[in-house]
């Protein structure tokens, strides 16, 4: 257990930040899942919309420090690669 008031405050602060980061990661996972499902489907417009929404969430997470910028970039690149392949088929 923390002994000083500042250490106790830091524990409370870290708990709040962890909760917010957990929510942000959950939003990312949901957006990426929706994008992958859209890319697996046949509707190209829906796939593009879902992919752009996922990319927006990834960019926001990287800006906030929830994800490393290279991690977000890698995920975005993979989604865009799948989207480009889907658009090339049509």
Image (spheres, helix red, strand yellow):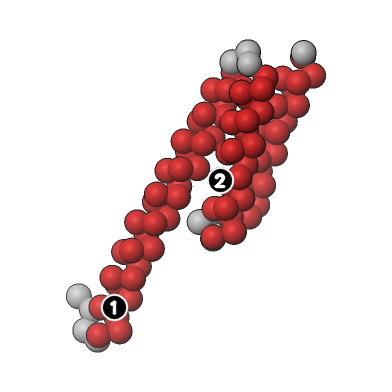
Q: Nearer the viewer, residue 60 or 2?
A: 60
The spot of residue 40 in percent (x, y) is 59, 18
Is residue 53 among what the camera can see? Answer: yes
On the rendered structure, is 80 left or right of 54? Answer: right
Q: Can residue 71 be seen at all in this image of the molecule? A: no
Please tell me which residue is depicted at 70% across the width and 27% down the height of the picture. 83
- Residue to which mark 2 is pinned: 57
Front position in the image: 26 or 78: 26
Label 1 secondary element: helix
Please give the count of numbered marks on the rendered protein.
2
**Vertical side of 90 occupied by 15: above or below:** below
Instruction: Tell me the number on the disc at residue 42.
Output: none
Q: In which quadrant will I find the N terminus?
A: bottom left
- The percent coordinates of residue 53 (x first, y second) are 59, 38
The residue mark sitting in front, 1 or 2, is: 2
| Residue closest to the far right | 88
Between 46 and 16, the residue placed more toward the observer is 46
Q: In which quadrant of the rendered view does residue 48 lie?
A: top right
Q: Is residue 52 above or below residue 15?
A: above
- Judge left or right: residue 67 versus residue 22: right
The quadrant holding residue 38 is top right
Q: CA distance from mark 1 to mark 2?
A: 30 Å
Instruction: Give the quarter of the figure containing the C terminus.
Output: top right
The residue to which callout 1 is attached is 9
Q: Residue at x 31, y 64 (%)?
A: 15
């Amino acid at each position: 257990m923390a002994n000083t008031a500042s250490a106790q405050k830091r524990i409370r602060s870290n708990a709040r930040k962890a909760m917010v980061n957990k929510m942000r990661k959950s939003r990312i996972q949901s957006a990426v899942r929706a994008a992958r499902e859209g890319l697996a489907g046949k509707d190209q417009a829906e796939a593009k919309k879902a992919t752009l929404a996922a990319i927006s969430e990834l960019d926001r997470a990287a800006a906030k420090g929830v994800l490393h910028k290279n991690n977000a970039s890698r995920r975005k690149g993979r989604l865009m690669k799948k989207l480009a392949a889907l658009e090339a088929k049509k």
